[in-house]
Image (tube, helix red, strand yellow):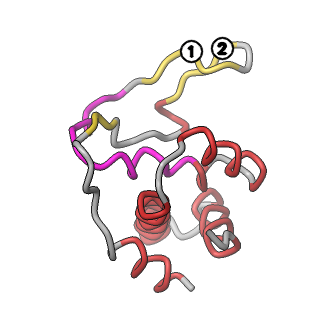
Amino acid sequence: AARAIWERATASRWEAAPVWFHGDVAEGNLLVDSGRLSAVIDFGTSGVGDPACDLVPAWTMFDEPARTAFRDAVALDDATWARARGWALWKAAITLRDHPADPGSRTTLRRLLADPA
């Protein structure tokens, strides 16, 4: 299943005009105040290109209902969503390599493998 996610992710590329991306949308880079997003920090990996890398929180932070709402809100095509799944798989795999007991990466993998999209 992981190989299928990876193959689908690498089967396409961003064909639209390049857009700004953050490059590391993760819990530590999202500041919350009173349950609401108040700031995004750490733009060290930002750039211009494919926005798929910024969709990784769909699996690292959201359960299935929230992921569905997020996908509807960003309104990007299936190929971009597939590349985002590849980014999430890559991030979980490299984190598990260095931190095998990391529960967040294990949760991400479970979500990726359970997500039919």
Whether the residues at callouts 1 and 2 have beta carbons within 8 Å, the answer is yes
Q: From the viewer's perspective, is residue 62 above or below residue 111?
A: above
Q: What is the secondary structure assignment of the residue under circle 2?
A: strand
Q: From the viewer's perspective, is residue 52 above or below residue 69?
A: below
- The tag on residue 38 is 1
44 within the magenta span:
yes
Q: Residue at x 75, y 56 (%)?
A: 64
- At label 1, the amino acid type is Ser
Q: Earlier in the sequence, mark 1 or mark 2?
A: 2
Left or right relative to 22: residue 107: right
Q: Residue 51 at x, y = what percent?
A: 36, 46
Q: From the viewer's perspective, is residue 28 above or below residue 99?
A: above
Q: Residue 60 at x, y = what percent?
A: 59, 52
- At label 2, the amino acid type is Asp
Q: Residue 48 at x, y = what percent?
A: 21, 39
Q: What is the secondary structure assignment of the residue under circle 1?
A: strand
* Count of numbered labels shown in the rendering: 2
Q: Nearer the viewer, residue 78 or 45?
A: 78
Left or right relative to 111: residue 3: left
What is the quadrant of the N terminus in the image?
A: bottom right
Q: Which residue is mark 2?
A: 33
Q: Nearer the viewer, residue 73 or 9?
A: 73
Magenta-drawn segment: 42-57
Q: Residue 15 at x, y = what percent?
A: 25, 56
